[in-house]
Image (spheres, rainbow, N blue to C red):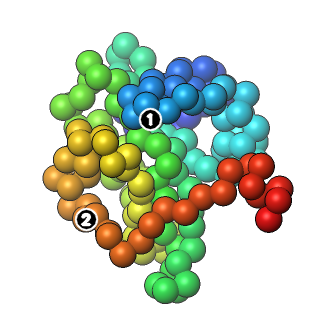
Amino acid sequence: MIRDARLDDLDTVAAMLRRLGHHVGAKPKVAAEDLAVFGPHGRGDFTMLVAEGESGILGILLYSIVFSAWRGRPGIYVSDLYVEEAARGLGLGTQLLRAAVARELPRGAAYLKLDVDRKNETGLAFYEKRGFRRRDSDHTMMLDEDAMRQL
């Protein structure tokens, strides 16, 4: 079952996000409190979906709505998609993506965008199998908090 994340899911979601970060060599700091403050139960900066089975939450998808001036339309930006290793191959990642698309297409979403760590060959293969294409014309640019303060 795919559903919106509830407040009582946030510890599990945060733990899954940390596992995702470790998978790509990051040192994630996310905690349930962060998800509560900035997520759908707080400021509403992003939407959280979970894939739940009999044994609990097996997968998560976090996304935000972004606007493209080039398209003149909003789109879906997936910041995080993670499925527990034991549940991979069951189609949960695809179901989570489809749920976000089904929710946002009627609201005018014209595209779905995400970033994949260059070393994450499994993730790249997963997305390419579903029709995603790499775009070499764009570079992800980022300012960390200290640099933002100096801007």
Furthest residue toward top: 55
Residue drawn where x is 42% and y is 57% of the image: 114
Please state the horizontal and vertical placement of residue 66, each as a whole percent of the image: 57, 67
Residue at the image point whose x is 36% and y is 75% from the top = 137
Residue under label 1: 60
Q: What is the quadrant of residue 85 in the picture?
A: top left
**Residue picked out by circle 2:** 133
Q: Position of residue 146 (x, y in %)?
A: 77, 49
Q: Which numbered disc covers residue 72? A: none
The structure residue drawn at horizontal position 41% and vertical position 62%, both measured from the top left corner, is 113
| Left-right relation of 143 to 104 | right
Whether 94 is drawn above or below 108: the answer is above
Task: Check the image and report above or below for 73 versus 5.
Answer: below
The residue shown at (66%, 57%) is: 143
In this view, the mark in front (2 or 1): 2
Q: Secondary structure at mark 2?
A: loop
Disc 1 marks a residue whose amino acid type is Ile
Q: Quadrant of residue 54?
A: top left
Q: Position of residue 58 (x, y in %)?
A: 37, 25
- Residue 129, compared with residue 21, is above or below; it is below
Residue 149 in sight = yes
Whole-percent x and y of residue 76? 48, 62
Q: First in sequence, mark 2 or 1: give its number.
A: 1
Could you say whether the residue bearing mark 1 is in a helix, strand or loop? strand
